[in-house]
Image (spheres, rainbow, N blue to C red):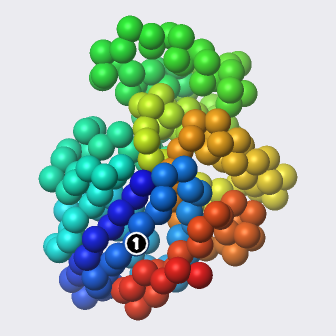
Amino acid sequence: MIKLEGIGWEAPGGFILRDIHVEIPTGIYAVLMGATGCGKTTLLEILCGLRAPAQGRVWLNDQDVTALEPRHRQIGYLPQDLALFPEMCVRDQIGFAPKLQRSLQVNTMVNELAEELGITHLLDRLPEHLSGGEKQRVALARALAAQPRVLLLDEPLSALDEATHAEAAQLLRHLHEKHALTVLHVTHSSREAESLAQMKLRLHDGKMLLE
């Protein structure tokens, strides 16, 4: 469950988030739309703990996480640029979070996720040798390796070509169902919203609207 309670934020000379209230039930795939620059990415960063809200509280699964560091929130986050580590091979990218968590099952987790996302043959490659679709799958595997309760996706399909786009959307549906994730997916695409959303939201004029 994701719950934003009275969230406020103002960027100097830019957008304003006003008294954002929304609750996304556990296990729901929600899609958030809105004009460029309206604050969608900032809202994801507030959820992750990368940015503190000026007002309001953030709740995850009935726990107030407003003051918690990102690593304690059990959130998987895919920023728009995917933020892969340029010096790390795919194997180490996926194993990054389990190693930080001192997991004893790092290799098993890496291999299982690589197989699930169809990237086993890429495990020893660096990001510079991956296609856009391959990078996206690696970033998803890295996010899932942290065993998140919530998955946040910022324009995850925007850089993909037509053929890869449909395949990636199907993969997101599969991951959502298999891992029982609560998902918040930001997009400009009404086609993505129609294809994936169980709950549709729109950010407009600083307010959150349920469509």
Q: Is residue 211 left or right of residue 43?
A: right
The residue depicted at 53 percent of the width and 44 percent of the height is 181
| In the image, residue 150 above or below residue 121 | below
Q: How many discs appear?
A: 1
Q: Nearer the viewer, residue 54 or 88?
A: 54
User: Could you say where residue 84 lies in the image, as x and y percent from the top left?
Assistant: 47, 38
The residue depicted at 42 percent of the width and 54 percent of the height is 1
| Residue 44 visible in this rendered orientation of the protein | yes
| In the image, residue 12 above or below residue 155 | below
- Per the image, label 1 sits on a secondary structure element best described as strand
User: Could you say where residue 179 lies in the image, as x and y percent from the top left?
Assistant: 58, 36
- In terms of image quadrants, where is residue 188? bottom right
Q: Which residue is mark 1?
A: 22
User: Could you say where residue 15 lies in the image, as x and y percent from the top left?
Assistant: 33, 84
| In the image, residue 68 above or below residue 99 | below
| In the image, residue 92 above or below residue 207 | above
- In terms of image quadrants, where is residue 3? bottom left
Q: Amino acid at mark 1?
A: Val
